[in-house]
Image (tube, rainbow, N blue to C red):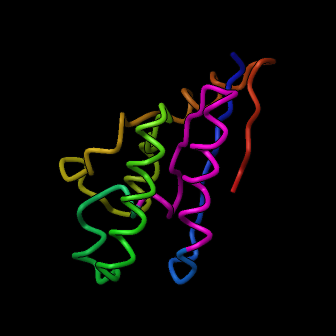
Amino acid sequence: MKQLIILVTTLNMEDLVAITDIFDGARAASNDYHVEIILTGESGIIATLQAAENGLDVKLMYSIYESMRTAKSSGVKINICERSIEWCNLNNNKLIPEIDSIVSSQYIMERSTPDTYVVYL
């Protein structure tokens, strides 16, 4: 089965539909692909419990986390890039359970093979 990697670099936190669409689309694609979402850059803020502590709307975060859980239940892997943790000044001890692992920039480059589709958002 072919791979689909979705690199999410930035998010408009005021556009809930756009954020949840990323995870809903990944779930739909998981019927035909091994799908992996990698949160990079400022998008990493949604990967930690700090999101609510940093003033992000609790209802918004709940909707995003529900969308993430649905994607995970269909086999989608969700990772965060170590650079995102640094960029957003996050505490990797407070990652949400939906995050499979912390990956390096090298890992991202190694995932780009001829059988892999890469999408940047």
Give residue 51's position: percent from left, percent from top: 31, 70
83 in relation to 111, above or below: below
Residue furthest to the right: 114
53 in relation to 35, above or below: below
The span picked out in magenta is 17-44
Predominant SS along the magenta part: helix
Residue 99 vs residue 45, the one in the foreground: 99
Q: Is residue 49 left or right of residue 106?
A: left
What residue sits 35% from the left and 42% below the top? 99
Q: Is residue 48 left or right of residue 70?
A: left
61 in relation to 26, above or below: below
Q: Picture quarter containing residue 47? A: bottom left
Give residue 80's position: percent from left, percent from top: 43, 44
Q: Is residue 29 magenta?
A: yes
Q: Picture quarter containing residue 28? A: top right
Image quadrant in which the N terminus is located: top right
What residue sits 36% from the left and 71% below the top? 61
Give residue 60's position: percent from left, percent from top: 39, 77
Q: Is residue 32 magenta?
A: yes
